Amino acid sequence: MGRPAQQGMTLAELMAAIGIAVIVSLLAVPLLGAARDRQRLLSHGLLLLNSVHQARAEALRRNQPVFLCAANLKTNLELQGCQPPQPVSQQVWREGGLVYADKGMDNASYDGGERLRLAMFDRERVRVLAPARQLTLLPEGRVEPEGGLVFQLRSGRHCLAVSVAPDGRAALGSMADDCA
């Protein structure tokens, strides 16, 4: 009688296959990290973009100013209001963006119960910079400060811009690598 055909793999073949799989996965890990950073940045950009869109829509609907400011959160992530002004030209929106309508329309500052939307940012991994700590979306859809502004979002080596035009319309820019 003949010898039976071999079934399965030998130990040497199995070890070679595992070794190749390990090498391929080690080559893919840096690419996955960069993709994760880009996706995180994009999701934060979309959060901010949607906050501007909602603020503008609410200003038009209510026929009153609606505000978007840098959120100020407690350590337990409970909302305290807007961040105080920072003594630098570029304001850092560390914790998120708060959309609110000033019910009394007296001081253009957040009072409890006026929140329309709170978008929280991952302050450890994404840095959001803006030339102002607060935007005002006017009832006719325009934005103050006049001339619009551009938010700069950074994560790792990647950056993304969210621009707000003078007419209040917001747009997501393209992703860039190796940002200074």
Image (tube, rainbow, N blue to C red):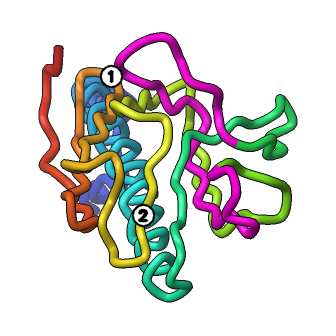
Q: Residue at x 50, y 83 (%)?
A: 63
Element at badge 2?
strand
* Residue 20 higher or lower than 66, as above or below: above
Q: Amino acid at mark 2?
A: Leu
Q: Is residue 50 left or right of residue 117?
A: left
Q: Residue at x 68, y 50 (%)?
A: 107
Residue tagged by mark 2? 137
Question: So how many labels did they put on this image?
Answer: 2
Query: Does residue 17 appear anywhere in the picture?
Result: no
Residue tagged by mark 1? 156
Q: Quadrant of the C terminus?
A: top left
Q: Quadrant of the N terminus?
A: bottom left
Q: Amino acid at mark 1?
A: Gly
Position in image of residue 104 (x %, y %): 75, 66
Distance between the alpha carbons at the discs numbered 1 and 2: 31 Å
Task: Please check the rendered image and state whether residue 89 is part of the magenta-colored stretch, yes or no.
Answer: yes
Q: Residue at x 43, y 27 (%)?
A: 127
Q: Residue at x 36, y 60 (%)?
A: 49
Query: Residue 139 appears in which quarter of the rendering?
Result: bottom left
Q: Is residue 74 left or right of residue 69?
A: right
Magenta residue span: 82-108
Task: Estimate how packed mark 2 is, as few (under 14), some (14 to 19) or many (20 or more) residues with alpha carbons within 10 Å.
Answer: many
Query: Residue 168 appears in which quarter of the rendering?
Result: bottom left
Q: Nearer the viewer, residue 95 or 122?
A: 95
